[in-house]
Image (cartoon, helix red, strand yellow):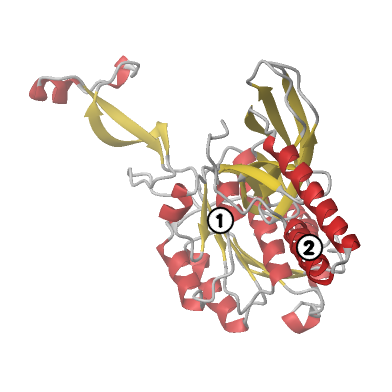
């Protein structure tokens, strides 16, 4: 990133410098009008200070700056490392200056000492990542001020560097799934190529297995045609993240995002297909922002006042049947749970994870006092668990509690 020859112009005089100039003018006027030499002397001293400060700022560094971020994607609470490489492009030693970087709402100020002629220096600094999101880095500013802070000079470079801060991922046991899909070749976007069931015919491309050539179609069309197979028995885990602002407060929504990330990661680690649906997500905007993974998408997730129960149920209804369904929501109403229970005909199992705020009592959320007896292992007393045939409702106040309850639930063999 090269500093341009001209940057955005700002007044070179600081507030302190403007105040000193006004004081010098007043002292000089009063001294000449009233005949007080001391006022004139004060004005002359102030003018000398202003001249010295202005001369100091006129000496400006001629440098090139490059910023590097390692890693470009991190996790909440784990800061990344920024590195600025500063190169002196002149045959003379550069003057000291200040490099100022913006990290979202935060400002990072770095003092750069003199650099020898043609020299190169690397400056490392932490990039704070206190919360998840897409953090824009920049603009990067090179600044100089005189020792008294009377004048300033700045050059700015607008960059599109981005630091992705992902939600925390808690270790979860993989969820057993057991609905077998259609053996007759019906498939969806998550079905895997090259395995069990015939799906379609397509033109041969180099690298295809010659044993899959369909000779009858090849003879009829005059070009090599191969059979394409998919594994339609591979169950897909469907994860739905509710974003309804009426069922979450700020903290409980962050916990819900962590649970969604943990469930998706647990499924991906097993090699099974997983489909994540975030209510209110705008896929085009996410792609334009550079989101390239599920964790990137979750980093962008926000509470949405436009989301409601009907949107949640609509997303579930439109999801391809088969495999497991995991719905992550806030304090779920009984009617919503009843409607989700109807999905047991299409998914197995159905798991609803209800994240409450920190002060909500679990018993008021419908916790089954006999949950410990049903699980057999004695679920953590802070998390509630209710079972129905083919459906489990897990209630917790945090992602960590939900992870404990999930692991014990899976250990108890979800039915």
Where is residue 315, by image quadrant? bottom left
Closer to the camera in the image, 137 or 25: 25
Residue 221 placement, left or right of 255: left
Q: Is residue 345 above or below residue 169?
A: below
In percent of width and height, residue 248 lies at: 66, 74
Task: Give the residue pinned by disc 1.
Answer: 324
Residue 42 placement, left or right of 290: right
In percent of width and height, residue 337 lies at: 59, 76
In the rendered image, the quadrant that contains the C terminus is bottom right
Residue 375 placement, left or right of 88: right
The residue at 66%/53% (across/down) is 104
In the rendered image, the quadrant that contains the N terminus is top right
The residue at 65%/32% (across/down) is 68
Task: Give the residue pinned by disc 2.
Answer: 28
Closer to the camera in the image, 87 or 258: 87
Residue 266 visible at all: no
Q: Is residue 383 above or below residue 236?
A: below
Closer to the camera in the image, 229 or 282: 282
The residue at 64%/39% (across/down) is 269
Closer to the camera in the image, 26 or 240: 26
Residue 366 visible at all: yes
In percent of width and height, residue 55 lies at: 72, 39
Decide: marks 1, 2 in contact (CB < 8 A)? no
Where is residue 376, by image quadrant? bottom right
């Amino acid at each position: 990133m090269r500093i341009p020859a001209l940057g955005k112009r700002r007044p070179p005089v600081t507030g302190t410098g403007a105040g000193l100039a006004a004081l010098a003018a007043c002292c000089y006027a009063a001294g000449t009008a009233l005949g007080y030499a001391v006022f004139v002397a004060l004005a002359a001293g102030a003018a000398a200070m202003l001249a010295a400060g202005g001369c100091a700022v006129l000496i400006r560094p001629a440098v090139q700056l490059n910023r590097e971020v390692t890693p470009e994607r991190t996790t909440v609470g784990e800061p990344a490392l920024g590195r600025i490489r500063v190169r002196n492009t002149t045959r003379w030693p550069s003057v000291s200056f200040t490099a100022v970087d913006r990290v979202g709402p935060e400002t990072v100020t770095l003092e750069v000492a003199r650099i020898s002629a043609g020299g190169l220096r690397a400056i490392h600094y932490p990039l704070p990542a206190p919360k998840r999101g897409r953090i824009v880095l920049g603009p990067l500013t090179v600044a100089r001020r005189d020792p008294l802070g009377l004048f300033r000079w700045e050059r700015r470079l607008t960059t599109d560097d981005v630091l992705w801060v992902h939600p925390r991922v808690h270790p979860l046991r993989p969820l057993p799934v057991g609905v077998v899909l259609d053996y007759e070749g019906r498939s969806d976007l998550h079905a895997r190529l090259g395995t069990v069931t015939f799906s379609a015919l397509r033109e041969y491309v180099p690298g295809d297995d010659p044993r899959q050539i369909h000779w009858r179609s090849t003879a009829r069309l005059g070009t090599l045609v191969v059979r394409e197979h998919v594994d339609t028995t591979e169950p897909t885990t469907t994860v739905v993240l509710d974003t309804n602002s009426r069922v979450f407060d700020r903290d409980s929504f962050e916990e819900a995002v962590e649970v969604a990330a943990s469930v998706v990661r647990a499924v991906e680690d097993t090699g099974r297909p997983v489909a994540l649906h975030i209510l209110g997500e705008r896929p085009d905007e996410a792609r334009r922002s550079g989101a390239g993974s599920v964790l990137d998408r979750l980093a962008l997730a926000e509470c949405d006042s436009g989301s409601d129960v009907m949107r949640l149920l609509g997303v579930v209804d439109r999801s391809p049947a088969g495999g497991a369904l995991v719905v992550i929501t806030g304090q779920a109403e009984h009617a919503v749970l009843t409607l989700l229970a109807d999905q047991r005909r299409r998914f197995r199992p159905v798991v609803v994870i209800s994240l409450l705020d920190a002060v909500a009592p679990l018993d008021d959320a419908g916790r089954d006092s006999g949950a410990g007896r049903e699980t057999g292992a004695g679920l953590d007393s802070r998390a509630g668990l209710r079972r129905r045939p083919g459906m489990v409702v897990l209630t917790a106040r945090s992602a960590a509690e939900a992870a404990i309850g999930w692991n014990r639930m899976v250990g108890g063999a979800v039915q």
